[in-house]
Amino acid sequence: MLLKGRKIIITGGPTREWFDPVRYISNASSGKMGIALADESNNISKNTCFIHGPISEDLLKNKPYRCIGVETTNDMLESVLYEIEDNSVLIMCAAPADYSPVKKSDEKIKKQNENIFIEMTRTPDILKNVSAAREFRKLNNLFVAGFAAETSNTEEYALSKLNEKKLDMICLNDVSKEGAGFGCDTNILTLFTRTGSKVELPILTKDKAASEILKQIEKELLKRNY
């Protein structure tokens, strides 16, 4: 088994971008899919680590693998770039915030009679940075899988992300479907690979979905003789 003994890095959960001391921009990701992937990965390779945004501590209790907690998208980027190495596998399952406030108020912004406007700037694209690091650091046999959580034009967007970010695989997650949204214990996925494979996974528990994702990665590693 090619995954056995490899370092497997999983990301999961949301990130937070604060605009004052008590409020932030984030999303509803629970981190459950990332944890399911880390659990299944640890059954295969004891060199598994889980980089996660703010999620319930109850979900992380007694995990036998390394758990690295981060807050912002930039924090997650730095951790991912630190952990990737030759012959490793990165599964980017997290839902990092795409925008961050340009300025963070030092004090709580009080409610006013007028509307307020918060200027936002793009956060770093983690997968694009991984692609650049792979080339710059000449990382050999790094396998990168991403997730695309979408609600419209799902397949088109997933395939464009696969190519644009130079991924080896992308897991399309149509979160508008019942049983596939944030926070639930099941998922519905379609896996697309750079070698042209398309695998549709019907509604499954996240544990079983994670197992199928790792099986597909194993097949891709065999195809490429990684």
Image (tube, rainbow, N blue to C red):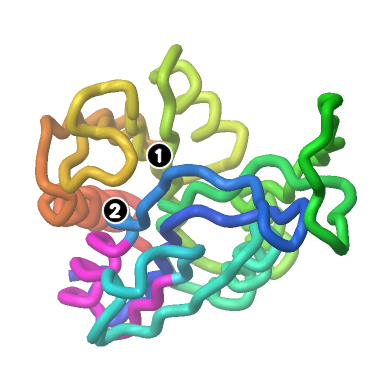
Which residue position is annotated with label 2?
Answer: 33
Relative to 163, does residue 69 appear above or below in the rendering? Answer: below
Quarter that holds the N terminus: bottom left
The residues bearing labels 2 and 1 have C-alpha atoms spaced at a distance of: 14 Å
Residue 219 rendering spot, x and y as whole percentages:
22, 51
Of marks 2 and 1, the one in the foreground: 2
Is 220 rendered above or below residue 119? below
> Helix or strand or loop: what does disc 2 sit on?
helix
Q: Which of marks 2 and 1 is nearer the N terminus?
A: 2
Compared to 85, does 27 lie above or below?
above
Q: Name the residue type under label 1.
A: Ile
- Is 46 part of what is drawn in magenta? yes
Drawn side of residue 13 relative to residue 104, left or right = left
The image quarter containing residue 154 is top left
Amino acid carrying label 2: it is Met
Question: Could you tell me which residue is drawn at 82 percent across and 25 percent down?
Answer: 115
Quarter of image, res 73: bottom right
- For residue 150, side relative to residue 173 (left or right): right
Region in magenta: 35-50
